[in-house]
Image (cartoon, rainbow, N blue to C red):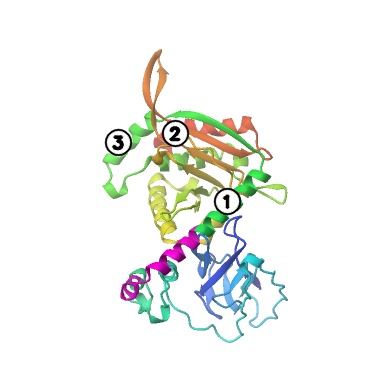
Amino acid sequence: MADFVMPTLGADMTAGTLLAWMKKPGDEVKRGEIIAEVDTDKGVIEVEVFTSGIIDKLLIEPGAEVPVGTVLAIIREEGEAPGAELPTVAAPSIPTEVSKPAAIISPAPGQPRVHISPAARKLASELGIDLSRVTGTGPGGRIQRADVERAASAKPTPTVAHDAAAERQERMRRTIAAAMARSKREIPHYYLSTTIDMSNAMAWLATENLKKAVVDRLLYGVLLIKAVALALHEVPELNSLWKDEKLIPRPEINVGVAISLRQGGLVAPALLRTDHQNLDELMKNFRDLVKRTRAGSLRSSELSEPTITVTSLGERGAESVFGIIYPPQVAIVGFGGPIESPRTVEGQVVLRPAIKATLSADHRVSDGHRGSLFLSAVDRLLQDPGKL
């Protein structure tokens, strides 16, 4: 038997609210399949299962708020007999500020649930809409965002919506503040910066985009993300986690991207296996990730698997940004916006588009020498964008 537990969706998460089960006892599940929806300060998250088998029992009832690590369901793995005796599970206590008893589901088949998209559920919660009164128009009667919006227009609740959104934003701000305070308190940061000539990258990008439809054109930001991913092959200790006072190298490169939310705050979900994606795939997946992040519809792996984070404030006019490491990661890379910078080329001073690249890294894991090699690798890779 395998335990399916409330996942850790970032170091700042202590508990989550189980909103719905996507499976019932007796259903077959495959690794990577969505099994549940969980509400967190970062939005409604679709939680994947990381083992294949049969759902044996669902232990937690939707609506319960439970701590990270709580066993939510039991999965019978291949070759195991049905109805095997369950191990005794001691559920951890919920912190006072989020205390709510976790309801236990009886061994009977799963209760009927509302079929609803994560974005629609999030909107209904913010608007105070009773989902039992909403008629779904999606496949199989699934409630979609448009259905909730129609229900809201019939019963305007501006004050409820504003209060719910403000409360979520305040919670997110508190959560971010706690994580960043912990980072600065516990992680010995060191900081490096360099200026990268972007002439080759910008010229190549302009030429490539002329060959593409407008909706398929590349943003220069994806070149930066891909260069970071490839540079980690040369300085792999920056693609690690620091847990239990030891370094844990990560076999995959999953670059987290800091995405600002329209209502305030930010989330940094991962582009999984970043180094294996070509630029067109990366651009498509980046657009999708931004859209789903702002709609509150992310997958658990996108929040639990980042191995390094990239942040950029260039579009806001900042020339450089020195980020704070998001534990348990050990580094964060910052990029400013392109500026015309004087450079010496063949004995002559010319103006070239350039960006400031910065590295904030954990001194327990690497040092300035290794960090400099990493930034040099990013620079070198961006000089030959056609090979990214």
Eye-nearest disc, 2 or 1: 1
Q: Secondary structure under badge 1?
A: helix
Task: In the rendered structure, find residue 177 and report the number of the disc placed on it.
Answer: 1
Pointer 2 with pointer 3, Cβ within 8 A: no
Q: Quadrant of the N terminus?
A: bottom right
Considering only vertical position in the picture, is 340 above or below 130?
Answer: above
The percent coordinates of residue 299 (x first, y second) are: 49, 61
Question: Position of 305 compared to 209: left or right?
Answer: right
Eye-nearest disc, 3 or 1: 1
43 drawn magenta:
no
Give how far apart the Cα atoms at labels 2 and 3 are: 25 Å
Name the residue tied to disc 3.
Answer: 207
Kind of residue sitting beneath label 1:
Ala
Kind of residue sitting beneath label 2:
Glu
Magenta residues, start to end: 149-169
Q: Looking at this view, name the residue that lies furthest to the front.
A: 159
Name the residue tied to disc 2.
Answer: 319
Report the front residue among 44 and 49.
44
The percent coordinates of residue 280 (x first, y second) are: 37, 47
